[in-house]
Amino acid sequence: MNRRRWKRWAAWIMTGLIIALAASPGSAATTVSAAPAGTASDTPYTLNSVLKAGVKTVLNERVPEGVRIGAVVRLYNTASRAVAVPGYELRAVTTGGVVYTLKPSADNPRIVQPQEKAELSYMLTVGRSDVFTLERLAWVNVDEYVYPKKETNMLNMPVAGLEWYGPSTVFKDAQRSKEWGASFTIPAESAELVYTPVRLAERHTPQGTTTVLVLQVRNTGSRQAWVPEFTVSGKTVKSYYSAQRAESGPIAVQPGSSRYLHFVMRLDSPEAWLSFTISTPESFTDASGTIRYEAGRLQIKAPAHPDTQTVQSSYDLLDPIRVSSTLRPNLANEVDIALAEVRRFEQAGDGFLTAVAKFRLVNRSGVSVAIPDFGVEWMTSEGVSYTGERMDVRQKMLMPGVGMMIGYTFTLPLSAGSDEQAQLTLLDGSPDTFQLPVGAVSIPLAGADAEESGGAADMYPFKVEIRSGSLDPSGLVTLDFGISRAVNMTFDERSVRLKLEAADPSGHVLMSQTYALAGAGRLGSGLKKIELGDRETTDAFKKVVIRLYEVLAIPGGEIERLVKTMHLEASSSPLSPAA
């Protein structure tokens, strides 16, 4: 037997084996019905005696060269040994009967391991300008060793409703179009992981609008499951926006447990959301390189209105703020957060307003906990939010039963000086990725630049009062301070200090001194004598203006708030502070 006859004889044997293994009705094209709804398997079609097949992705996307047709199919090996991937052709058939033979990806697997699945990618770009739809994918065995060559249709897989045309695709199938709040599984992915859209939160700042879509993923299975790689994109009337997942790296969900996934979208200005598409990545490789694309799996209809944060409008200072019980990774349930003090003022010559909000944190547990890392936003009457800058804090832990003061500063436009109310919102999350509102209060505001009225100035956690003062013509000022401090309250001693300034009637500063209110060398209650300095004439000290400032340490510097003014005259009776 010569070499040519031997090769032909071997080819006949291999073809016969393949046909014998294939579970085929013969050469006639047979359309296999779709898998029943609710089927957990993603490989519902029998390809041969050991392999089952399923459709994962169908791409029908317009590109500059024409139309890109792509498909990703799965093979499942039901046998107890490895099985070679059959050398069948995969063909895409349009509703008009046009047949396209798709090219296999160069990195498609050649073998399917026992009891495992393998994914095979196929693609073809055709120069068509019209719109068409695909009806089915067909596995075809082509015998090249007979003349004329013989083609046997091994399996047909319907693809109606599975095509992905790009971002403009709108799924009509109820299995792929979900109402807001409805639970779902991602087609062709783990059926044990059930997802539910639970929140759509928006923040509007001068830098733009940030929208966060929150999905809860629950593991309904009996073993640990890993969240698959998928992306989210949002659709508005104007455009499409890709989301960035805040959580990085592999995410494992234990049986019976749930996790929250956060997808962040950034816009230049607010827009109304229509839907959100969940897509998974695919790729195809040939001699020219690798093509990567996203294929949509399902769409979630946007809620009628974005999430709105409940605002405590009747709020009293030092009352705990009601904080959301979920979606709070940085806020321990054992820590009460209360607003202690709110101020708004303009430092001389700034041309803008500075606002300060101080919070009291109390650890109600019996163990030390980390100081909560939260953000704060100040919303003006115009509905614009400004992010607060946290004052320096060196302390890391919050002790049981002991409170701590945390301060935030805000830079506001002068127009905010006429606001009679302000809304302060607590934010949880990371400023580098996203922050979500978890609690909010509305509080009345005093007029900008208003000094403290009454005897004592509030500088939480302190109250500072000058009970009396006198001026000696020689330049000696005597002040009687009354300083009290909230009990069981700690704070960073650098963050709140007191500055005392004396000036003559013309405004010339005669002396200025900053005092600590805590720690060694702190200023306490009692008499304080201050030398104004030498003067050529004693009548230079007939009148002096004493000013008290609260000094707050912020990242990169300090800010000062005028809290009290006192006018003293030489050889006169001690005067009470004048507001």
Image (tube, rainbow, N blue to C red):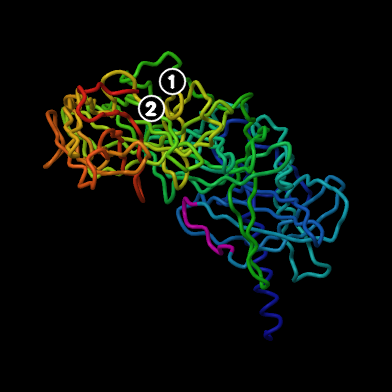
- Is 110 magenta? The answer is yes
Decide which of 216, 485 is in the foreground and name it: 485
- The reply to whether discs 2 and 1 touch (Cβ–Cβ < 8 Å) is yes
Magenta stretch prevailing secondary structure? loop
* SS at badge 2: strand
Decide which of 375, 217 is in the foreground and name it: 375
Q: Is residue 579 above or below residue 345?
A: above
Question: What residue does disc 2 label?
Answer: 342
Decide which of 465, 542 is in the foreground and name it: 542
Q: Between disc 2 and disc 1, whose residue precedes?
A: 2
Question: What residue does disc 1 label?
Answer: 443
Residue flagged by tag 1: what amino acid is it? Ile
Q: Is residue 267 above or below residue 281?
A: above
Residue 481 percent location from the top left of the image: 17, 28
Residue 182: image quadrant is: top right
Residue flagged by tag 2: what amino acid is it? Val
Instruction: Tell me how far mark 2 sits from mark 1, CA to CA.
Output: 9 Å
Residue 489 percent location from the top left of the image: 20, 29
- Is 382 magenta? The answer is no
Residue under the point 82% across and 70% down:
147
* SS at badge 1: strand
